Amino acid sequence: MAGEDGYGIPRSHPRYWSLVIREKLVEAFREGIVVPQGLIAHGRGECFDYLIGEETQPFAQEAIEAAAAALLLAEHPVISVNGNTAALAAEHMVRLAELLGAPLEVNLFYRTEERARKIAELLRRHGARRVLGVEDATARIPGLPSPRGMVSPNGIYRADVVLVALEDGDRTEALRRMGKTVIAIDLNPLSRTARTANITIVDNIVRAAPRLVEAVEKLRSRPRSELEQILARYDNNRVLSKALQHIAQRLMRLAQMGIAIEIG
Ligand code: ATP
Ligand code: MG
């Protein structure tokens, strides 16, 4: 129908994109890629996106550039993919892995072998060449009970830099304790993941993933010394502070302006 997309959501709807993303997640849920808990996690993310203003902010862009530098400098970078990430950003995660020559690894909080397989298939349909974490999730992250802690010995287990998105704080902490550099994409600057990661991209994965691909494309021809400088200048604590200040100031501005919508 004119003015509508495949989901029947009118393009004129003020929350069009948010509704399209929900439909994508529901579809992935029906296909067995996303778990019901993933739908709830998305709702928490949406709430923070509303507060942030549903646009990539400068603090997120700064973290994206640092993340690109860290991934390019890494010896064994790994892109961790869970159900929500696969549903919302498979194409960009595959592209990122290709640019970095890094493996993708299916890594699930609520792990079942069937779901791991389905996510790997989805990634392969998007052109992924190397997907770990399905049959080879035989190593365990210390401190995490199985199956929550099962990873590939050739992937996350030996990685020096791991990109995670919509990750649980407990698992992020366990990766840090293993000495890994953790890059997180997380809309909630207050989550344990956001506060534990080395580099936190406080942005919606839908916007952050293509920007991260762009940043890697831009920085990959630069000398190592320049990438090292980007990382040396980066301060995650300051970036998280900026995210909180942005939300606080934005809310104060809105409160002062008056936000009631007049009809008629
Ligand atoms: P933590 O365990 O780190 O304290 P949590 O328990 O609040 O966080 P989890 O369900 O463990 O939340 O992790 C999901 C995280 O993903 C949440 O912080 C949520 O804000 C974030 N999130 C949800 N949807 C998106 C999205 N589309 N893009 C980026 N982040 C998202
Ligand atoms: Mg959690």
Image: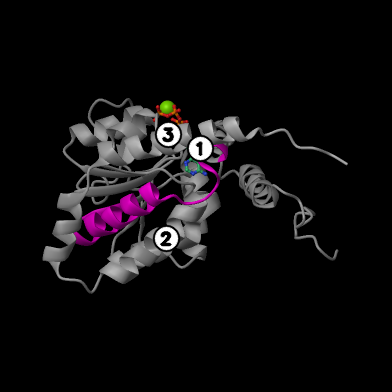
Residue occupying image coordinates x 49% and y 57%: 90
Q: Nearer the viewer, residue 200 or 243?
A: 243
N-term-proximal mark, 3 vs 1: 3
Residue occupying image coordinates x 19% and y 32%: 177
Amino acid residing under circle 1: Arg
**Residue 164's mark?**
none
Q: How far is the residue under mark 3 from the one under mark 2? A: 26 Å
Residue where numbered disc 1 is placed? 250
Q: Secondary structure at mark 1?
A: helix
* Helix, strand or loop: magenta stretch: helix
**Residue 211's mark?**
2
**What is the residue that sits farthest to the left in this orientation?**
225
Q: How far is the residue under mark 2 from the one under mark 1? A: 23 Å
**What is the residue that sits farthest to the front in this orientation?**
256
Look at the numbered disc 3 and say if its residue's Cβ is closer than 8 Å to ligand 1: yes
Q: From the image, which quarter does the C terminus lie in?
A: top right
Quadrant hosting residue 129: bottom left
Residue where numbered disc 3 is placed? 109
